[in-house]
Image (cartoon, helix red, strand yellow):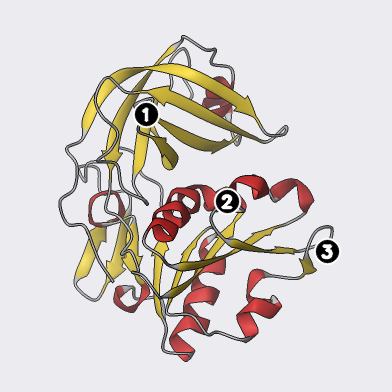
């Protein structure tokens, strides 16, 4: 495995909207242009977006970086509409400006050539896994992705993920792929992987981590704790680890599950 410990310098800037692509009524992809190179952005990092023109969303919104386009000096954000803030962001037009602090947080540990990795995402938790799968494929890793959701409307961007990995699908209601939770999917019954990565609802990540631990497979998760500042000042995103309480926004959001006190 290889890890990049040279984290890019964070900055707060007004970025121009290049694209606001609607996926369905609940999800969209926002692409923004950076005045600086985006080549230093790493898989698993996130941004904090300031939502203007509302009194009900005065805190910045943490959003995972979905993909990076170095040719356009841009990056993409996969966003789910869950309230007024994300609804307003969904209404941004091409050419609009948005106040973004980026890139924040630490990256995943990247497996190397000849290894086999499983990525498990639930709902909008798939967001950091596209860029991760792309980088893993570039490293020569055999990448497999399990996408989970309540129903078929929650299984999104499959075509994009297919560019980098073998795809498996699980839905709670059986409307797409195998019926059941991701941990009940057949791919999870034969755990011949060198590394597992996961992002999504907390109970899902805990269940994935438990299976990985039982098979003695390294597992990293991207936590989705509430993050108000993104710089470790407000302490609202603290999680308990074997090294004490750590801020998810600065010490994470990516953690090896061996250091998380989940048991």
**Label 1: which residue?**
71
> Circle 2: is it few (<14), some (14-19), or many (20+) Cα within 10 Å?
few
The answer to whether residue 102 is above or below residue 155 is: above
Q: Dot 3: what SS?
A: loop
x and y percent of residue 57 in the render? 46, 26
Q: Dot 1: what SS?
A: loop
The answer to whether residue 212 is above or below residue 246 is: below
Asked if the residue under mark 3 is in contact with the one under mark 1, i.e. CB atoms within 8 Å, the reply is no
Q: Earlier in the sequence, mark 2 or mark 3?
A: 2
Left or right, residue 122 beside residue 226: right
Q: CA distance from mark 2 to mark 3?
A: 24 Å
- State the residue in front, 112 or 220: 112
The answer to which image quadrant residue 2 occupies is bottom left
User: What is the number of the mark on residue 174?
Assistant: 3
- State the residue in front, 40 or 149: 40
Asked if the residue under mark 3 is in contact with the one under mark 2, i.e. CB atoms within 8 Å, the reply is no
Left or right, residue 16 beside residue 182: left
Give the residue at x 48% y 16%. 54
User: In this figure, what is the number of numbered marks?
Assistant: 3
Left or right, residue 210 beside residue 189: left
> Circle 1: is it few (<14), some (14-19), or many (20+) Cα within 10 Å?
few
User: What is the number of the mark on residue 163?
Assistant: 2
Q: CA distance from mark 1 to mark 3?
A: 40 Å
Give the residue at x 72% y 32%. 25
Q: Dot 2: what SS?
A: loop
């Amino acid at each position: 495995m290889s890890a990049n410990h040279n984290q890019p310098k964070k900055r707060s800037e007004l970025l121009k909207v290049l694209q606001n692509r609607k996926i369905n009524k609940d999800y969209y992809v926002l692409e923004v242009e950076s005045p600086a190179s985006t080549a230093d952005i790493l898989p698993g990092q996130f941004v904090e977006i300031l939502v203007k023109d509302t009194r009900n969303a005065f805190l910045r919104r943490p959003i995972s970086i979905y993909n990076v386009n170095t040719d356009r000096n841009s990056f993409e954000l996969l966003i789910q509409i869950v309230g007024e803030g994300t609804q307003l962001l969904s209404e941004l037009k091409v050419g609009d400006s948005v106040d973004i602090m980026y890139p924040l947080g630490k990256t995943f540990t990247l497996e190397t050539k000849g290894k086999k990795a499983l990525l498990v995402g639930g709902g909008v938790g798939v967001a950091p896994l596209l860029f991760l799968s792309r980088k893993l494929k570039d490293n020569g890793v055999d990448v497999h992705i399990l996408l989970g959701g309540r129903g078929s409307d929650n299984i999104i961007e499959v075509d994009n993920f297919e560019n980098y990995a073998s795809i498996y699908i699980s839905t709670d209601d059986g409307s797409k792929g195998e019926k059941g939770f991701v941990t009940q999917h057949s791919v999870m019954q034969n755990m011949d992987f060198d590394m597992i990565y996961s992002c999504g609802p907390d109970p899902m990540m805990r269940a994935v981590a438990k299976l990985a631990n039982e098979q003695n497979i390294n597992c990293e998760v991207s936590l989705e704790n509430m993050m108000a500042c993104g710089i470790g000042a407000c302490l609202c995103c603290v999680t308990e680890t074997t090294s004490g309480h750590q801020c998810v926004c600065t010490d994470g959001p990516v953690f090896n599950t061996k250091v998380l006190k989940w048991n």
